[in-house]
Amino acid sequence: MLVLTTCGGPADAERIASALVERRLAACVNAVNGIVSTYRWQGKVARETESLLLIKTTSDRYAALEEAIRETSTYELPEVLAVRVAGGLGEYLDWIAASVQRDSE
């Protein structure tokens, strides 16, 4: 799976990415800093500079990943969008699966 979330900036991105990888909820997290998001929130249009996280995980780890994003995000309502991966380099997909296995597996 590819999970997308935004956060307040590079420091938040690094903190969240490290937590997800350390907890074996993500194999890899790419941070794209400096994106500009325009959105409607509480009846008003807002525009903020944020960081976008591209999180590689498996469907088995998704629920725990979502909960970890809720715990680590500073946002009242964090963006969490999960996209199923239809294909990819087999060895890379195997690496993702192995990287997010629980220690007891």
Image (cartoon, rainbow, N blue to C red):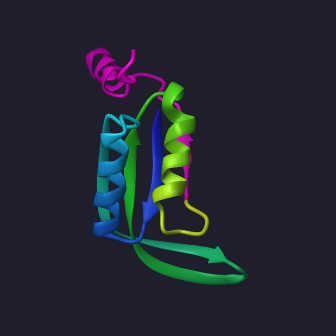
Q: Residue furthest front?
A: 104
Residue 95 or residue 48, whichever sits in front: 95
Left or right relative to 67: residue 96: left
Look at 40% across and 24% down and name the residue there: 102
Q: Is residue 96 magenta?
A: yes
Which quadrant of the view contains residue 21?
Answer: top left
Look at 52% across and 28% down and name the residue there: 59
Residue 102 or residue 40, whichever sits in front: 102
Tell me: residue 14, above or below residue 28.
below
Look at 45% across and 61% down and name the residue there: 6
Tell me: residue 13, above or below residue 95.
below
Q: Is residue 94 magenta?
A: yes
Tell me: residue 45, above or below residue 91.
below
Tell me: residue 52, above or below residue 46.
above
Look at 30% across and 41% down and name the residue there: 22
Left or right relative to 20: residue 81: right
Image quarter where the C terminus lies is top left
Q: Residue furthest right?
A: 43
Residue 17 or residue 83, whichever sits in front: 17
Count the labels in the image. 0
Left or right relative to 57: residue 84: right
Which quadrant of the view contains residue 52?
Answer: bottom left
Q: Position of residue 5 (x, y in %)?
A: 47, 55
Q: Which residues are magenta?
A: 79-105
Q: Position of residue 34 (x, y in %)?
A: 31, 70
Q: Position of residue 66 (x, y in %)?
A: 54, 45
Residue 39 visible in the current orientation: yes
Residue 83 visible in the current orientation: no
